Image: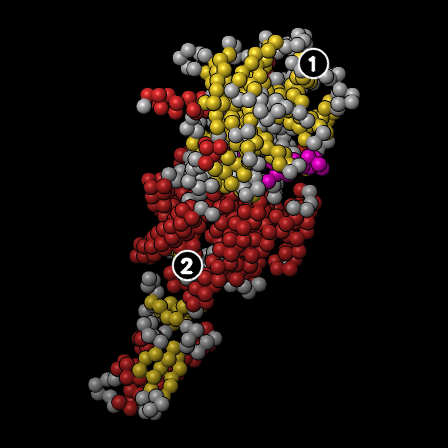
Amino acid sequence: MNIELVLLVVLFGVIGFFGSYYLNGYLYNAFRQNKMYDPIVSRSSHKEKATRSGGMALFFTFCVCYGFGKAVFAMSVDLYALISFIFVALTGMADDFFSIKYREKFFLQLFAAIVLLQSGVYIDSFHGVFGVYEIPLWASYMVSVFVFIVIVNAFNLIDGIDGLAALLSVKFFVLIAGIIAVTSSEMNLVIPSIVGAITGFLFFNFNPSKKVFLGDTGALLLGSVIAFFVFYILDNDNFIITDPLIRRPLLVVLLIIYPLADTLRASLIRMYKGQSPFLADRVHLHHRLIDKGMSHWGASTSILIMSVSVVVLGFILSSYFSLTLCCIIIFIYLFMLYYLFFN
Amino acid sequence: MRAFLLFLFFSVSLFCQKLDSSDFLILEGENPNYYYVLTNDGYYISENSDNFIFKNYSESLPKSLNVDINTLLPITHKSKNYLLYPGGGLLYLFENGAVKRIDRSFPHRNQYGAYFFSHKDNLYLIGGYGFWQTKSIITKFNFNSGDWEIVTAFGQSPDGIDQGTFFIKDDNLYVFDFLTRASNNQKEKRNDNLYVLNLESFVWKKLGVTNPLIRSENQFKGAKRFFTFNDKLLFSYLDNPEFYLADFVSNTLKKVKDEVLFYKSGGHSVIKKNNLIGAVQNSLTGEITIESFNISSLISNEADSALYLYRDTEEFYNYIYFALSFLAILIVVLMVYYKRVAQTYLLDENTISISGLSKSISEKEQKILRLFIKKRSVPNSDIMNLFLEKNKTKDFAVKKKNKTIVSLNEKLLSVFKIEFISKKKSKSDSRQLTYFLNKKIRIVEDGAI
């Protein structure tokens, strides 16, 4: 084990945590003094006064950690990826402050996706799904942009109850940290910084007396960073340590199974009712848990544990069965979870 | 002194032999005491490490051998020297000073850059590049028919193996650092995984990702050389003054500084005893000499610490355990925190609230609750101070205090379903009263950090 790397990971995790904790407190005070609380409407799951400053705190913490890491430890993320993250975060801030229209937000996300593609990290292979491997460049770009939009919005949509988007993001980053640490020495300090920052935020998110939400800034920012790492895993040029264990597309889907499944389900229900699939309502799976009487904490941790169990099951099944059989068994497992907990 | 320095300089190379042309091939030879250098005109034989003799071929070279000598793939198998035509197919035997063709095949042109090796009784050719695709096929030479047969392999085989690094140990063929081009419209790219092929069952297995340190930048023919030395793999890259010593059993990689600048040499090299034999070209005169370097002393000059050769799946599983443990600890810590803050009531000027539930309270009630923000127990005297009035008796104040607290408790119980304040008498003095806030409750001022 590389002790130096472990110490650096701990250092950046601690900097991220305390940086985020301080900034969340500071921004909460600033928002409160200006009475900038999140409005409580019929769809709201909260009844306390809360600010939407968590995303900004995350963004500034990430900037601080990246600046420190870049200056001292050669931490590096591709410039285009950084520009894309910053653009997405600014889009989120604009939405948090002025509540921009969905169509405008969509085009801004599209632009961020196109900028991200310039980093050279994109989905250039289906890795055997439907028997397809390498795909042409134009198809790579189209698929990557589509996946980016889906992931970013999926994380935005699940940010409906306390801690859910943040905990599922922590799960994603913690599980892929091992992959990134092996394949990219420049990016292996990015993940502890983000995990530390999200953990610092969670202490405010669950606190009723000083409640802070991720807001669109946080949800979109986390979604875009997650989309980037999804591209990184699916990019054929990167060699991933999990290749002998599990197929990359399956790994990626399992890592973000809840946001994907929930968004797909919610969109299908809305379309079935003849409504816009982008309509904001309370048809999400986590709302069902809340309506059944669970607390936000209970619902978020239950979903986290279920989604971790799906990843573990995927790894175990991949060692013994083909991709198709794995998918079938995982589908059955997901339906079981749905009927046991969400029905 | 001068003589001593000259001695030191020449002691590095045991002996050397000048060559006229760059078209030659060093052949390991059937005897540990000598090796061959084949050229177009004849061959050199090094006897007893100090004598270098040139001999003409006893028979003229076969007509089918229409390529440069240095493009042939040599192997010593069962004390016989074999030479394979580039791309596979034609096989020659170098014996008794003559090169004879022994196959009944044709130039396959299907496995350029492949690895030619012997295992037990057979000669194999694995991987290579041909007809615009990299190959991972394994062909075996049939000594009876003189043909090459394809060996069927199973498991997680790579899409193609071009310019790979190979190592054989205990019926296992390890392959890493190679190029792959699975289809015509794809550009060739480096595969950084370590694969192992069992030479008994012919089952491929992917072991993990190799150390990024050994990913060479100069991935072209001749840029890399690898040898088996003391049951380990010794390999080096052109223009890099370092050797790498890979131990597949202990999964370690060591860097060895090449102090004799062997890395500047080129072409095929062989290991005889503890000597590495290769060709060195003088950059000024262009003169090519065959030189021998004692590498046992080189190997002892190891760099500080051993690095990992590859990250295997077991290591990833260890990481996953760590990741899951981290998530579990995070949940526990957050749960403890949540339990603590979940019963936090917000107190402002005229309401007390929690998770959407709120209750209006009077100014006096607000002042009583405010006393419990900083401490969980409040002496009766502190609460009494809130009710004492100039023109009223103390008894009146006591009654008013008691009534207010009872009323407050009932009011809060009806909304929040929990009793807020309880009172206890002191054990030593029953007249001394203390009011306690319920242990499950925490009161904070709205917006306080």
Residue that label 2 marks:
A203
**Quarter residue B122 falls in:** top right
Of all chains, the one bearing label 2 is A
Residue B362 seen in the current view: no
Judged left or right of residue B396, residue A278 is right
Q: Residue A24 or B236: which is nearer the viewer?
A: B236
Q: Residue furthest left?
A: B390
Tell me where the magenta segment starts and ends, as one range: B190-209
* Cα gap from disc 2 to disc 1, whole angstroms: 80 Å
Q: On residue A161, which mark appears? A: none
Judged left or right of residue A190, residue A171 is right
Q: Amino acid at mark 1?
A: Lys
- Residue B43 lies, in percent from the top left, at 59, 13
Q: Does dot 1 land on a helix, a strand or a loop?
A: strand
Q: In the rendered image of this protein, does residue A190 appear above or below residue B256?
A: below
Q: Residue at x 42, y 11 (%)?
A: B285
Q: Does dot 2 land on a helix, a strand or a loop?
A: helix
Of all chains, the one bearing label 1 is B
Q: Residue at x 69, y 14 (%)?
A: B100
Q: On residue B100, which mark appears? A: 1
Magenta residue check for A92:
no
